[in-house]
Image (cartoon, rainbow, N blue to C red):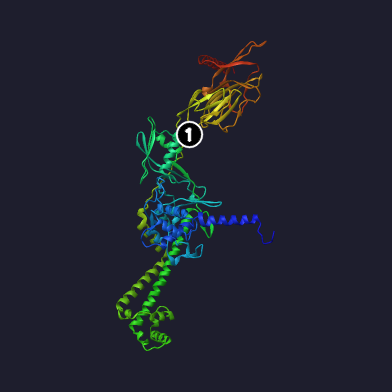
Amino acid sequence: MQESDTPLQGMYSDWFLEYASYVILERAVPHINDGLKPVQRRILHSLKEKDDGRFNKVANIIGHTMQYHPHGDQSIGDALVNMGQKELVVDTQGNWGNILTGDSAAAPRYIETRLSKFSNEVLFNPKTTLWAASYDGRNKEPVTLPAKFPLVLAHGAEGIAVGLACKILPHNFNELLDACIAVLRKEDFELYPDFPQGGIAEITEYNDGLRGGKVRVRARIEKHKARELVIREVPYGTTAGSLADSILKANDQGKVKVTRIEDCTAEFVEIHVFLPAGSDADQTIKALYAFTDCEVSISPNACVIEDKTPKFLGVSEILRHNAKQTKAILKQELEIRMQELEDKWHFSSLEKIFIENRIYRRIEECTTWEDVIEEIWNGLESFLPLLKREVTDDDVVRLTEIKIKRISKFDSFKADEYIKGLEDQMKETAKHLRNLTKYTIAWYQGLKDKYGKDFPRRTELTTFEKVDAKAVVISNDTLYVNRKDGMAGYNLKRDEAVGKCSRMDDIIAFSRDGTMRVVKIADKVFVGKDNIHCAVFNRDEPKYYNMIYRDGRGGRAMVKRFQVAGVTRDKLYDLTKGTPGTRVLFFSEHDTEEEANMHVRVHLKPALKLRNLVIDLRLSEIEFKGRAAQGNIVTKHAVDRVVRIPQAEQDILEAKAKRREKREAGNS
């Protein structure tokens, strides 16, 4: 290998870094200065170049933008439609799609656009714009636009780069301006998202839009009739169609019960959800929030480009940066305006002196250009102290370019009025520069007064608890079990019915060999062969279990009482000592400890010298322990069977036991 050759590993390393840097800086993440991605900035620059107040075909704008953004017309068209649907920086005409229904825009040749008055006011000023050459060097494009508004927080932004992602949620126009004013006044402020689809948002975990935060957004659901719900607003990131599909899917899964859905969404969201007879509307609304897109959770991740580096900044910090930037840009614009006014005043005063004092007549006899310039200088010499800055040779040359027609029609009174008007504007500009913060606040307030009425808050901010899915799921299925084969589920309708269930439940199953498992319910699932007990499992309300088992093939009879709380799904638990040949002789499940306090009768197998073949066992005398406890010894003899003593006989035995305990207490 020659010394000039690059190792393949090194080439891949360099290329990957270049690609990652390109995707982050040039495609996926907006810049903090103007809140725009490169494709958006180039679209707006192209619109400005073609701006004459009239609408332009989107296809024409796409083609014009490609001289700055060489990545295909599709990406440009999608970005332009996305900006158009937000109705802030561009005006639209034609079918631009519908964010509520998810309908796409018409083809670029059929729709039109132009810059809005707002974007012309806050985004463009060639005198304060830093320019760079386009990709092919034929044109110049802005590095960033001199934005005087936190556009990225109004629009929101989303992108996936290499190794990082960006998700900035949209905020309310008026609230952003109020926050900018608060920054300049050094006051506290709070910023929360406002979504164009409306909805109801829970923002207690917003975390200033940083990674790790969360916003939960709900659809607005109204009870129209006893068996009819109407959805008026949908969560951010969904459409009326996708939300209706999620409801139908939940209905098919048995999580929500509806009879039909009618989507009447057009200009506004209107989805009618019809419920079956006997349904509880309030419970159904909770189920819609739990199992459908009527409630979504959004994880923001505010990331912007600053100093050619991606930075994770909170929305408050982004807004503070923009407020300070706006103040700096306004100062720069005022200074430029002051310089322009001073230049106008200077030349207007010089022109007035030149014409009123007839200095132009001094050059009538001059034969050379040098003589002309010298005569004008000689004529101006006595008037130079009246001017505010030095006269230059360029000023003198400019005087020679005044047309005779202007000299002949010169009106001294109008000239004085014009100069006085310039002086008034200079005083006003100087005042604004001295009170720059006050001027910036007034500028923001002017924006709010002019455009704020078009941007009311659409999303209601509130707090609400997360709906417990298991608490609202409809138990409208039946759990069946095939004890011999060890299968259970809601589709085994030919087998033994156990009880009602929902499709979010778990199944707890006990087998004759003393093992137990908890599995997720399904249409058909294995729960263990030779099943002795199968039921719906509720972790929050553990049951009370009595179990008597034989330890091994000829071992002792053991009794244990236990509860099942924390378990791992699909894990096999052994409730006995694990001796081969172990067999459960008696098993019972109870809702309360009192119900579990029963008497059982243990029948022993006949044997030599064994006179008493029956043992009555009072289970209340045995403590409840964890499922891992092995139990207490009942007998060493072989057990034939264990049965529950009838309730009437239990009552008699319980009374005898209490009398015996009373006598023993008296004797002691």
Q: Is residue 551 left or right of residue 540?
A: right
Q: Residue at x 58, y 57 (%)?
A: 18
Quadrant of the image for the C terminus?
top right
Question: Can you see residue 87?
Answer: yes
Q: Amino acid at mark 1?
A: Lys
Residue 489 percent coordinates (x, y): 51, 28
Instruction: Please determine whether, in this image, residue 391 is positioned above or below residue 242.
Output: below
Instruction: Please determine whether, in this image, residue 33 is positioned above or below residue 421.
Output: above
Instruction: Please determine whether, in this image, residue 247 is positioned above or below residue 145.
Output: above
| Helix, strand or loop status at disc 1 | helix
Residue 513 percent coordinates (x, y): 61, 23
Figure quadrant of residue 174? bottom left
Figure quadrant of residue 610? top right
Q: Nearer the viewer, residue 658 or 68?
A: 68
Residue 570 percent coordinates (x, y): 58, 32
Q: Is residue 52 left or right of residue 205?
A: left
Figure quadrant of residue 486? top right
Q: Residue at x 50, y 23 (%)?
A: 494
Quadrant of the image for the N terminus?
bottom right
Question: Can you see residue 184?
Answer: no
Classed neighbour count for the residue bearing mark 1: other residues with Cα under 10 Å, few (<14), some (14–19), many (≥20): some
Q: Which residue is mark 1?
A: 470
Q: Nearer the viewer, residue 330 or 303?
A: 303
Tally the numbered discs.
1
